[in-house]
Amino acid sequence: MGGEEERLRRWRLVLGGAAEGAAEGGLEGVLEGADARMDAALTALYDEQERRGAGLGASAPRVARWLGDIREHFPASVVQVMQKDAIERLDLTRLLLEPEMLEAVEPDVHLVGTLLSLNRLMPERARESARAVVRTVVRDLEARLTRRTLAAVSGALDRSARTHRPRRTAEVDWDRTIRANLGNYLPERKTVVPSRLVGYARGQRGVRRDVVLAVDQSGSMAVSVVYAGVFAAVLASMRALRTSLVAFDTAVVDLTDQLRDPVEVLFGTQLGGGTDINRAVAYCQTLVTRPADTILLLVSDLYEGGPREEMLRRIAALTAAGVQVIVLLALSDEGAPQYDRENAAALAAMGVPAFACTPDAFPELMAAAIERRSYDQCRITPPGR
């Protein structure tokens, strides 16, 4: 294809159907073969006039063919965006209850969130297909996130356990050792002579931290619920952590006993409905037996439907008892979320960090929490903004 033909082809794909019939430019009839099929797939979704006419309609076979076309002609990352747009723009959620549709889609975390929101409406014949979609996404997320999470958390647990008799040079915490021996500074030699060493206590056994994940399962938190369920299962596999998972809307459900299988965890959630953060925090208080060794991760956009002041008092009481409380306004790759700024600012004023976090940053967040150091590098959204 010559340079001028390629230029016209690219402009035709960019401009879409509006380019056909243009008085100038020579764009009519430029596309053929695969290009024409790509253009038709894009037009069916994004061209307003086409959508008012034939479009994709509400026909399951037609939508299934369209899904097959976009998977053939576009990379997986683009397919996922187009699927998400189709569900939102064309209201295809009803069709996702059809097994044939579920077999045609490209599995991704947003689709899982949509399926979980339809869980209670799903007929039995579609349930196994939905589980297969969720299982595929969970397997991919575990492959992507498990190793880094285990490495970061294990290292943080080792570093957080201190000893004054390190056995090897590699076990010496030089930063803490120097600070502990500043009184032994020799100006003439410009050095510190350590009278005692501070090191990492390796190989400790038993539970060293309790982690409670309380996850808001209101509809706006769908993607966060998926990631939180996977991370909870990963953390639950570590003997040094005692991990609990609590999902809530206006009711509270403890999913801890299902953490061996994150797919079961996700199907145990009930996305949608209102939010009672206070009730969830009250339940989490009953799980705290070692406040100084407990990390409470509240995953919520903080839009409280229950008694706000009581919720804030409960969180203040937990922090006063020594519990590390961290609020994740979102656990997703979707950028800065919508959240209740007043509640986030109130929590920040009492020393409770509230920010959004990406899944890739979560392992470092857990490491920082275990070592009680700054979470700044894990933030997407500063508190109170």
Image (tube, rainbow, N blue to C red):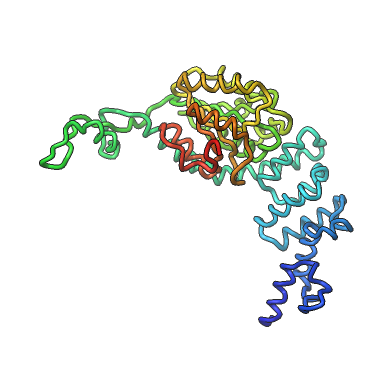
How many badges with numbers are in the image? 0
Foreground residue among 224 and 120: 224
Which residue is depicted at the point 78% across and 73% down?
32
Q: Where is residue 316 in the image (x, y as percent from the top left)?
A: 52, 21
Which residue is depicted at the point 36% across and 29% down?
161
Residue lying at the far left in this picture: please name it.
188
Q: Where is residue 15 in the image (x, y as percent from the top left)?
A: 74, 68
Q: In this view, does 95 lie to the left or right of 150?
A: right
282 is higher (above) or lower (below) than 109: above
Q: In this view, does 83 lie to the left or right of 345?
A: right
- Quarter of the picture containing the C terminus is top right
Where on the picture, by quarter, is residue 129? top right
- Quarter of the picture containing the N terminus is bottom right
Where on the picture, by quarter, is residue 3? bottom right
Q: Is residue 331 left or right of residue 72?
A: left
Q: Where is residue 77 in the image (x, y as percent from the top left)?
A: 65, 55
202 is higher (above) or lower (below) than 28: above
Which residue is depicted at the point 69% across and 33% down?
218
Q: Position of residue 341 (x, y in %)?
A: 60, 35
Foreground residue among 345 and 81: 345
Q: In this view, does 222 lie to the left or right of 27?
A: left
